[in-house]
Image: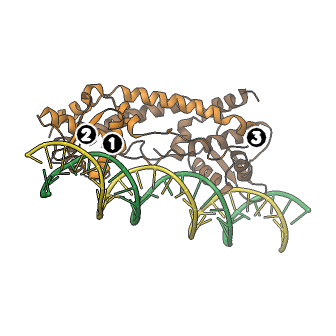
Chain colours: A brown, B orange, C green, D yellow
Amino acid sequence: MSANSRLTIAAHALAWIGLYERQGYEVATSEQLASSANTNPVVIRRLLGELRRAGLVESRRGAGAGWSMARELNAITLLDVYEAVEQGPLFALHRATPDQSCAIGCNIQPVMQDIYAGIEKTLRHELSRITMEDVLRDILATPR
Amino acid sequence: MSANSRLTIAAHALAWIGLYERQGYEVATSEQLASSANTNPVVIRRLLGELRRAGLVESRRGAGAGWSMARELNAITLLDVYEAVEQGPLFALHRATPDQSCAIGCNIQPVMQDIYAGIEKTLRHELSRITMEDVLRDILATPR
DNA sequence: GCTGTCGTAACCAATATGGTTGCGACTTCG
DNA sequence: CGAAGTCGCAACCATATTGGTTACGACAGC
């Protein structure tokens, strides 16, 4: 399916910022976040830009600038993050419209679409049950 | 997420072959299936090759050759099809290992992996509840 | 043999993802 | 006021996936 790591990296950044704030710091820089996630600051800024558009984080510019939470960790679910960084369906229908003069081709699209809608609804429900607070707690609870 | 249409096209082909057999025909050609799904015969052969490896269909070569079901439609679930044509996880972890000297980087991977495993388990359960017989019935039940 | 179909390789185009560089905009601070 | 640090964003590149296309050998039925 060619999975990507956007949800993982976004969750990483949020957990990092959340923990950093609890340690008394004001803002985290994309440089720090990129270093922790082992990626590039621009990649972090791109992802966090989408989270900011979704109202999950805020950014300040200028010297001593960086990123901070716009909501508490326990008010952000993985569904919020998923919707901020992923768009489009999980499964695609046909690229080209199937043969409408065929009993299958004529009706398979709405049928598959219904099935996919049900699956995505379930996926969203699962994601909505997990908060970033849960994620951070589990991370800190792991030994080592 | 860059969704693909592999599950859709595979289900289309299976429904088509299943219906065709019920109409008394022996085998369906990749040409017929491609025409119905509005794609290329080679694309169909590639996908059906994966379904054959999974034991869902059979193929005959030579003149008058083509594809037939290896199992009844009601003995094939969408999970069978999904596992035949999709491999790899729904969500990827970090591309590069995160900073192991960081409280977050050190433990986020197992935490996210657990979450993703739960979600994929749910996805598989949903897919396993729908058979190709259900799909074909719904297609034929739709008016027009 | 001839014909029709699969099996498969090879190549191409389009798209998504993620890394990288560069630079302007902005804000703090000396 | 100027220097420094950081974001915002565009541009470009490498890689991988997906799907379409062509080509051709292998195979089986007639």
The residue sitting at 66% across, 48% down in the picture is A58
Instruction: List the residue tagged with mark 1.
Output: B49
> In this orientation, which residue lies closer to the viewer: B3 or B51?
B51
Seen in the image, is C30 located left or right of residue B139?
Answer: right
| In the depicted structure, whether residue A105 falls above or below residue B23 | below
Q: Secondary structure at mark 2?
A: strand
Classify 10 Å Cα crowding around label 1: few (below 14), some (14-19), many (20 and above).
Answer: some
| Marking on residue B59 | 2
Which is closer to the viewer, label 2 or label 3? 2
Classify 10 Å Cα crowding around label 3: few (below 14), some (14-19), many (20 and above).
Answer: some
The reply to whether callout 2 and callout 1 are in contact (CB within 8 Å) is yes
Instruction: List the residue tagged with mark 3.
Output: A20
Is there one chain holding both mark 1 and mark 3? no
> In this orientation, which residue lies closer to the viewer: A143 or A125?
A143
Q: Amino acid at mark 3?
A: Tyr
Q: Secondary structure at mark 1?
A: helix
> In this orientation, which residue lies closer to the viewer: A96 or A26?
A96
Q: x, y (%) of residue B141?
A: 18, 32
Is there one chain holding both mark 2 and mark 1? yes
The residue sitting at 71% across, 48% down in the picture is A33
Mark 1 belongs to chain? B
Quadrant (top left/top right/bottom left/bottom right) for the C terminus of chain A = top right
Q: Secondary structure at mark 3?
A: helix
The reply to whether callout 1 and callout 3 are in contact (CB within 8 Å) is no
